[in-house]
Amino acid sequence: MRIQLQHFSIGIPAAVILSMTMLLNGCQTAPDSGIKTAQYQTSTQPSNNYNRDKGEIAKIRTTLAAEYIRKNKLDAAQRELEKAFAADSRYAPAYDMMGILLQQEGSTINLQKADGFFKKAIALDAEFVQARNNYGVYLSQMKRYPEAVQQFEVAGAALGYEGRIGALENLGRTYLVLGNKPAATQAFIRALEGNRNSIIAHIELVDLLLEQNRIAQAQSLYEETGQLLRHEPQSPRLLLQGIKLAAAHGNINDRQALAQQLLSSYPLSSEAKQLKTWLNNPEASWK
């Protein structure tokens, strides 16, 4: 099972990056002096608030680091985050972003280091919910699933948090790994209640409902999923769900058509393997 990675939003327009760079360059006193933590200097305002400037510099550096991470320029991102720490050592998003950076690099030593940065971000700002979700993704990657559940629960309960639905989807999938299907079902239902367009919640709930033989509800969600994805090719998982539902309804024509599509389009998929096993023994339960 793959946890949905919803670390951060880093689609930053080039014009914004340029303006950030110009703003930061304006803080330098010499070409090789690097970023300064002192106040900005302008012709009309000799000095702005020092603490405000430090926080602003840290924010800009962290945003630039996020853009570098998106482009997989990890060394450049590291340098930006070190400058963010130098500007404001208590800027929680910089620690969260460093955790993401180390996690993306993926070596054993950096994965171990990432844990401390996520914990530091949360310790500095307990209300920084995005760090909770990001830490949960990290914990899931490290197979520390019970700990991941705790972080996703906090993020999923944070009303107003833009990533709340994603956190609930992550929570549901983590519960599936732990084998707690009732809790997973509730998490996906909460995700749908928050956003009826949640594709992940739709797909996961169809399988859970099929296992419970709640065919009518599974069929309704399956049809909703088809509407949401009507402009995209059907995935092997959706095709297999359609085959199961057609079999449950005794609809032989639909079942055969979908089975042919699955076997021809995705012959090496795990869903195709499940289908072949079932076709050899239709009386057996789906695996």
Image (cartoon, rainbow, N blue to C red):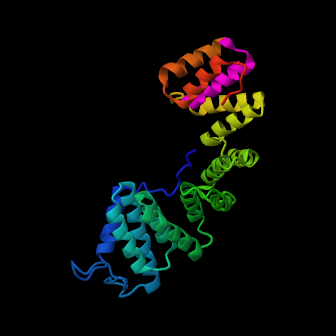
Rendered position, 124 above or below 166: below
The chief SS type of the magenta part is helix
Q: Residue 47 at what x, y percent from top left?
A: 38, 87
Rendered position, 231 above or below 254: below
Rendered position, 235 above or below 91: above
- Determine which quarter of the picture holds residue 242: top right
Q: Residue 211 at what x, y percent from top left?
A: 73, 33
Rendered position, 45 above or below 178: below
Point out the residue furthest to the bottom here: 46
**Which quadrant holds the N terminus?**
top right
- Lateral position of residue 54 relative to residue 172, left or right: left
Q: Residue 110 at what x, y percent from top left?
A: 43, 65
Instruction: Please tell me which residue is depicted at 59% across the width and 19% down the height of the picture.
Output: 258
Q: Residue 263 at what x, y percent from top left?
A: 52, 20
Point out the residue furthest to the top here: 253
Near-viewer residue (153 or 107): 107
Near-viewer residue (44 or 21): 21
- Lateral position of residue 126 relative to residue 15, left or right: right
**Which quadrant holds the C terminus?**
top right
Instruction: Please tell me which residue is depicted at 63% across the width and 18% down the height of the picture.
Output: 279
- Lateral position of residue 211 relative to residue 23, left or right: right
Instruction: Please tell me which residue is depicted at 73% across the width and 21% down the height of the picture.
Output: 248
Question: Is residue 242 within the magenta segment?
Answer: yes
Per the rendered image, the range of residues in magenta is 236-252
Residue 198 appears in the figure:
no
Residue 281 appears in the figure:
yes
